Image (cartoon, grey):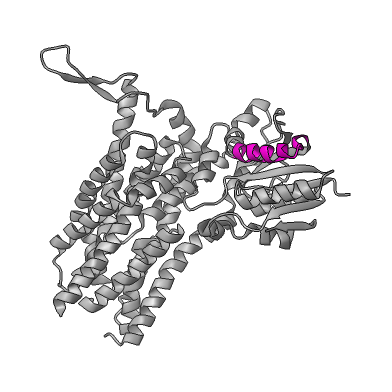
């Protein structure tokens, strides 16, 4: 029985589908929502904004909070908000996800997130996670 | 016949200028508009005026380089129109996909492509320009890093730029003559801050004019089909048009990206980038305002993220010197918390925000864009047999 599942979410619809799938497929598991903030972007605004904040952890948490709120809503729809944990990391999504994946039995991830520009800056996250993850990965599409 | 070609060329110029207006108005005024310090229309108006000023003065040096120094022959009118199409193509890709394609570099690339096809490239000038393209990002990064690491925290303590409720200024009608007074809730510091933001925005608009006006029209000026003075006016009108129309959207997209950065930091970036761009334009070197801006932003963030001791660690008395190496080592374990639970005190590493590989990948896009425009122009002019 799968008991620890990692679901990286970026606020996109596809990542919400990933969470919905994880909730359905692993009814017994504890699910950790991972939100990576301050990722590379066209002007590095988000990364620099977080770095310049007096308390960058606080700033990073504020960036991640909307994603956590949305995840909480989705989980409470099926009455499983208690099974949800949240975590956030800084910087490149792929690296952050791979660094954490070891602590989990499965990673459930949406097949793609953002716009053309975002894919250019950070690449296709799902594809790279599949290639480099130490644990099995479920790609939701 | 010549008139028709010139007309097509001017239309292409206006298209290029229009798009430049869209993107550079966003950078110069996004932070101020985002902070609610002035309206988008006022920003576009100031933009147009200062772009003209920059193009009319310092911009002429860049115009001379683009129109006459990169290749040893003059750019014929037909070739100039083709070059403008390549510049426009680059800008179109930039705007549609949100990818930064530096206009100045694309322009130089397209003209150099023409030079390669006709064997007239002035290698000395090209080498000189490219060496500055290498130096500029390094300079921006370095200035940003020094400010971010050593000066910014202090600046941040001393200056606070804010926008209070109510209008900035009000007319006081009590005396015999109405005179301006501070609006409701306005402090002198806020008034001063607003004026500083406006002045810096104008400075950035000036440098945008100096570096970007020539991009839109230099290919037509080279053959003498268009005189420099009317060309600068055409470019200004086109950039202004972009500023009043599509910049509404870019001010939001660029503005939202830049609004993640504190206004004070945005001002530091704008001063640094504008100064670099104006100085290089003065020396006749085509340079991208966006490139200087982004590298200063990265420098600021990186400098601050890798400062030796963070506030939190200082409080805990946990001052391990190895933390300054944070940018290079990944911190695998960040806090896991239940929703609504208190935060664990395990530290994140801000250095992770600026992964060197991600920065290299980003910079490589600046190399690919101009290289593509050079190759495309070379292929086109070789095939077309223009000489």
Is B53 situated left or right of A73 in this image? left
Hey, which residue is sitting farthest right in the picture?
A1
Q: Which residues are magenta?
A: A64-82
- B202 lies above or below B18: above
Residue drawn at (68%, 41%), measured in percent from left and top? Answer: A74
Residue B170 visible, this orientation: yes
Which quarter of the rendering shows the C terminus of chain B?
A: bottom left
Residue A92 visible, this orientation: no
Which quarter of the rendering shows the N terminus of chain B?
A: bottom left
Which is more toward the observer, B63 or B142? Answer: B63
Measuring from the top left, give residue A69's x and y in whole percent.
64, 36
Is B277 situated left or right of B347 in this image? left
Hey, which residue is sitting farthest left in the picture?
B176
Is B176 situated left or right of B106 in this image? left
Query: Residue B202 lies in what quarter of the image?
Result: top left
Query: Residue B8 lies in what quarter of the image?
Result: bottom left
Which is more toward the observer, A136 or B211? Answer: A136
Hey, which residue is sitting farthest front in the picture?
A77
Which is more toward the observer, A76 or B310? Answer: A76
Measuring from the top left, give residue A52's x and y in whole percent.
52, 37
Q: Is residue A75 magenta?
A: yes
Measuring from the top left, give residue B130's x and y in whole percent.
38, 66
Q: How many marks?
A: 0
Residue drawn at (75%, 52%), measured in percent from left and top? Answer: A107
Measuring from the top left, give residue B304's x and y in whole percent.
53, 40
Which is more toward the observer, A7 or B146? Answer: A7
Question: What kind of secondary structure does the magenta stretch mostly adopt?
Answer: helix
Query: Residue B191 lies in what quarter of the image?
Result: top left
Q: Is residue B35 magenta?
A: no
Is A127 situated left or right of B127 in this image? right
């Amino acid at each position: 029985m799968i008991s620890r599942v990692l679901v990286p979410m970026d606020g996109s619809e596809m990542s919400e589908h990933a969470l919905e799938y994880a909730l359905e497929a692993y009814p017994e598991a504890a699910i950790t929502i991972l939100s990576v903030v301050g990722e590379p972007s066209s002007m590095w605004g988000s990364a620099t904004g977080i770095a310049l904040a007096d308390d960058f952890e606080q700033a990073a948490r504020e960036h991640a909070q909307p994603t956590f709120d949305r995840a909480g809503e989705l989980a409470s729809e099926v009455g499983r908000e208690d099974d949800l944990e949240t975590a956030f990391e800084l910087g490149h999504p792929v690296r952050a996800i791979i660094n954490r994946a070891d602590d989990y039995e499965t990673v459930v991830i949406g097949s793609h997130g953002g716009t053309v520009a975002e894919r250019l800056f950070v690449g296709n996250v799902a594809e790279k996670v599949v290639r480099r993850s130490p644990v099995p990965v479920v790609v939701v599409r | 016949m010549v008139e028709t070609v010139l007309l097509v060329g001017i239309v292409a110029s206006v298209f290029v200028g229009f798009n430049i207006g869209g993107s550079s108005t966003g950078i110069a005024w996004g932070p101020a508009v985002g902070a609610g310090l002035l309206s988008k229309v006022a920003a576009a108006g100031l933009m147009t005026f200062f772009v003209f000023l920059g193009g009319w003065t310092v911009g002429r040096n860049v115009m001379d380089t683009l129109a006459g120094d990169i290749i040893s022959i003059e750019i014929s009118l037909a070739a100039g129109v083709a070059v403008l199409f390549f510049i426009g193509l680059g800008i179109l890709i930039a705007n549609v996909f949100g990818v930064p394609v530096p206009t100045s570099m694309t322009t130089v690339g397209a003209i150099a492509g023409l030079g390669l096809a006709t064997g007239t490239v002035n290698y000395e000038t090209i080498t000189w320009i490219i060496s500055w393209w290498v130096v500029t990002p390094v300079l921006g990064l370095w200035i940003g890093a020094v400010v971010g690491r050593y000066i910014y925290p202090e600046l941040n303590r001393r200056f606070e730029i804010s926008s209070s409720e109510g209008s900035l200024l009000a007319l006081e009608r009590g005396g015999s003559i109405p005179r301006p007074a501070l609006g409701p809730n306005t402090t002198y510091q806020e008034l001063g801050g607003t004026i500083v933001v406006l002045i810096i925005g104008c400075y950035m608009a000036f440098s945008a004019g100096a570096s970007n006006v020539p991009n839109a029209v230099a290919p037509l000026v080279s053959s003498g089909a268009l005189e420099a003075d009317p060309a600068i006016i055409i470019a200004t009108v086109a950039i202004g048009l972009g500023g009043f129309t599509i910049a509404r959207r870019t001010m939001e997209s660029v503005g939202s990206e830049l609004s993640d950065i504190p206004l004070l930091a945005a001002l530091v970036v704008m001063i640094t980038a504008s100064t670099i761009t104006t100085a290089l334009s003065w020396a006749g070197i085509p340079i991208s305002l966006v490139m200087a801006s982004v590298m200063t932003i990265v420098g600021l963030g990186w400098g601050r993220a890798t400062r030796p001791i963070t506030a939190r660690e200082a409080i805990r008395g946990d001052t391990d010197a190895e933390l300054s190496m944070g940018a290079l080592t990944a911190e695998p374990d960040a806090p896991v918390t239940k929703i609504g639970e208190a935060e664990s005190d395990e530290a994140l590493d801000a250095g992770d925000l600026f992964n060197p590989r991600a920065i290299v990948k980003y910079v490589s896009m600046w190399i690919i864009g101009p290289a593509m425009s050079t190759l495309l122009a070379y292929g086109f002019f070789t095939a077309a047999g223009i000489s």
